[in-house]
Amino acid sequence: MGRPDANRGLGATGSGESPRSGMPPSRMTPSGMPAADAQADAQTDVSGGEALRTNSVFLGFAPWIIFDVVASPSTWKYAALAALIAALVLNVPDLRRGSFKILEAASLVFFAVIFVLGLAVDRQDLMWLETYAQTLANGAIAVVALGSLAFTPFTEQYARESVPRQYWDTPLFRRTNRILTAVWGGVFLVTALLGLLALQVKSGSDWLNWVIPIALLVAAIRFTKWYPAHVRAQARG
């Protein structure tokens, strides 16, 4: 019997058969997928695609929303306690894993400080907090969100939960999350400014404190759902 030719019949699959697509091996991935399709799938993963779960991001904001809804000059301490409890409950999964997301860590610190101030400091010394509690909370979360752009955009921490690690440092993944984080930070910054304005005007406070902020929140949620899908569609061309 003659010696087998070592190179005979070895296609991209390495199984002795040529690739079924008829595409040159150089254009195929090790899995047998056309390189163009593999690149498109990679870009889908990189963009975050469906991986950035809007519900997860929204839950991260839940303590802040609770505080914003409940807080008033007479109830801000109870609002801080409710928000702190919500933050603790929502942090349980991360606490068990020994990890923290910046948004959730900020929630714990901010509402713990506010609640302790309410217990330890005389009410007369906290009149400023009674007046600006909601505005302060919105401003704080805006600072956290926008500040995270200098390091790790906070939405990226949620997207990483279901995007393969090899894509975390890619430009497309980072850019997508920087845009999403900037949108959320902008929404809360505008909401804080609207709260300040509401304290200065005699009418229209409901629009400034509720109607416009809720509309902005809904818009941010929809954008968070739409934008990764838009990036995915562009990647697939």
Image (spheres, rainbow, N blue to C red):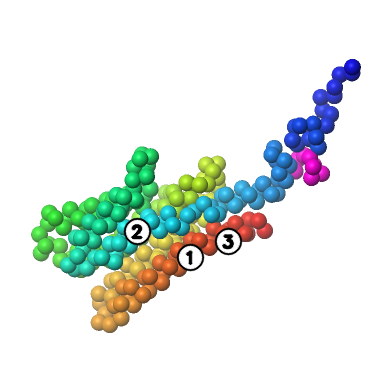
Is 128 or 94 nearer to us in this picture? Answer: 94
Position in image of residue 222 (x %, y %) = 48, 65
- In the image, 121: left or right of 98? left
| Residue 222's disc number | 1
* Residues rendered magenta in the picture: 19-27
Assess disc 1: are there few (<14), some (14-19) or many (≥20) residues with their C-alpha within 10 Å of its C-alpha.
few
At x 42% / y 61%, what residue is drawn?
Answer: 184
**Circle number at residue 105:** none
Residue 89 visible in the picture: yes
Residue that badge 3 annotates: 230
Mark 2 surroundings: few (<14), some (14-19) or many (≥20) residues within 10 A: some
Identify which residue, 164 or 201, lies in the foreground: 164
Q: Residue at x 71, y 44 (%)?
A: 33
Local crowd size for mark 3, using a 10 Å CA cut-off: few (<14), some (14–19), many (≥20): few
* Residue 110: image location, x then y, percent: 26, 54
Residue on which disc 2 sits: 62
Circle nearer the viewer, 3 or 1? 1
Secondary structure of the residue carrying tag 1 is helix
Corner quadrant of residue 216: bottom left
Compute the Cα span from label 1 to label 2. Answer: 16 Å
Alpha carbons under labels 2 and 3: distance apart: 26 Å
Q: Secondary structure at mark 2?
A: helix
* Lower sequence index among marks 2 and 3: 2
